[in-house]
Image: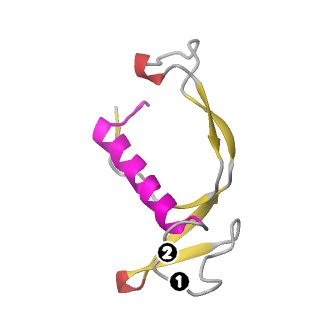
Amino acid sequence: MKIVRSKNSVIKSFMLALIALLIFSPNGYSQNKKAGAHPTPGKKWDLKLPGNTLLPMMWVAPGKFVMGSPESEQGRKADESPQTTVTLTKGYWLGKTEDRECATS
């Protein structure tokens, strides 16, 4: 089974991650300016949404990773290269949600 993602789905996922970075990073914007209002990095945290809905959040720690696929990967596409080392200098909170816009074929 192959997962196919539309370009809009990738852009939407990126934008959600960027919003989470801006809102929930320890040094970023927060609606709650009280001292100690931010959750502790690495600990369990659920963001309370309207209607008493909870969004489970996960901490993405600073570090490095390789983005892109190797040329030897079977089925890779031209837009998956070149491989690039990405460095996250600050950690951030990201909502744990499924990408329901993926299609399988």
Estimate how packed mark 2 is, as few (under 14), some (14 to 19) or many (20 or more) residues with alpha carbons within 10 Å: some
Number of dots carrying numbers: 2
Please provide percent x and percent y for residue 98.
44, 55
Amino acid tagged 2: Ser
Quadrant of residue 43 in the image? bottom right
Give whichever of 35, 92 is nearer the camera.
35
Residue range in magenta is 1-25
Please provide percent x and percent y for residue 55.
47, 71
Q: Is mark 2 on a helix, strand or loop?
A: loop
Please provide percent x and percent y for residue 105.
34, 31
**Secondary structure of the magenta portion, mostly?**
helix
Which residue sits at x=51%, y=59%? 21
| Mark 2 and mark 1 residues within 8 Å of each other at the beta carbon | yes
Question: In screen coordinates, is 99 left or right of 84?
Answer: left
Please provide percent x and percent y for residue 83.
57, 23
Is-magenta flag for residue 16?
yes
Location of mark 2 (residue):
30
Which residue sits at x=59%, y=66%? 27
Give whichever of 83, 55 is nearer the camera.
83
Which residue sits at x=60%, y=62%? 58
Which residue sits at x=53%, y=67%? 24
Estimate how packed mark 1 is, as few (under 14), some (14 to 19) or many (20 or more) residues with alpha carbons within 10 Å: few
Amino acid tagged 1: Lys
Is-magenta flag for residue 95?
no
Question: In screen coordinates, is 38 left or right of 96?
Answer: right
Residue 87 in view of the camera: yes
Location of mark 1 (residue):
33
